[in-house]
């Protein structure tokens, strides 16, 4: 992998890691381990979905992760399911 591509990937990861810190403990406990353990191995489409998820309001994400409601957007639902299934496998 060329050095500038690796550097760009690292910058992207660091940016996503900081955006994953939400200031709400419940969200931090789900998002930080997900980004540290899973994000780098995601296909680009799922990385884009994760970035889209981070643009959502904390209260909405909390409701989705606590399974009190579901996002209308199927891309967001895919990411919510992926994150929830990591901590609550079937």
Image: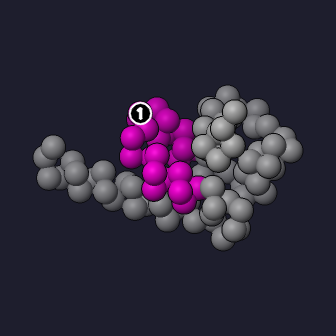
Tell me how many marks there are.
1
84 relative to 26, above or below? above
Q: Main secondary structure of the magenta part?
A: helix
Q: Residue furthest left?
A: 2
**Magenta stretch holds residue 48:** yes
Identify which residue is drawn at 71% across, 62% down.
26
In this view, 9 is above or below 45 = below
Structure colour scheme: one colour
Tell me residue 69's x, y (percent): 84, 41
- Percent position (x, y) of residue 56? 67, 51
- In percent of the image, x 45 and y 56: which residue is there? 36
Above/below status of 21 relative to 12: below
Quadrant placement of the N terminus: top left
Residue 19, position as x, y percentages in the image = 53, 61
Queried whether the magenta region covers residue 47, the answer comes back as: yes
Give the residue pinned by disc 1. Answer: 43
Residue that appears at 72% across and 55% down: 57
* In this picture, residue 11 sits left or right of residue 81: left
Q: Which residues are magenta?
A: 31-52
Q: How far from the left and from the top, in percent, is residue 17?
A: 47, 60
Question: In which quarter of the view is residue 68 placed?
Answer: top right
16 vs 84, nearest the viewer: 84
């Amino acid at each position: 992998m060329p050095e500038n591509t690796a550097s760009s990937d690292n910058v992207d990861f660091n940016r996503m890691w900081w955006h994953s810190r939400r200031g709400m403990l419940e969200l931090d406990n789900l998002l930080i381990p997900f980004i540290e353990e899973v994000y780098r191995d995601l296909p680009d489409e799922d990385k884009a979905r994760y970035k889209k998820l981070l643009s959502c309001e904390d209260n909405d994400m909390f409701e989705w992760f606590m399974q009190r409601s579901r996002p209308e957007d199927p891309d967001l639902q895919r990411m919510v399911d992926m994150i929830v299934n990591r901590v609550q496998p079937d």
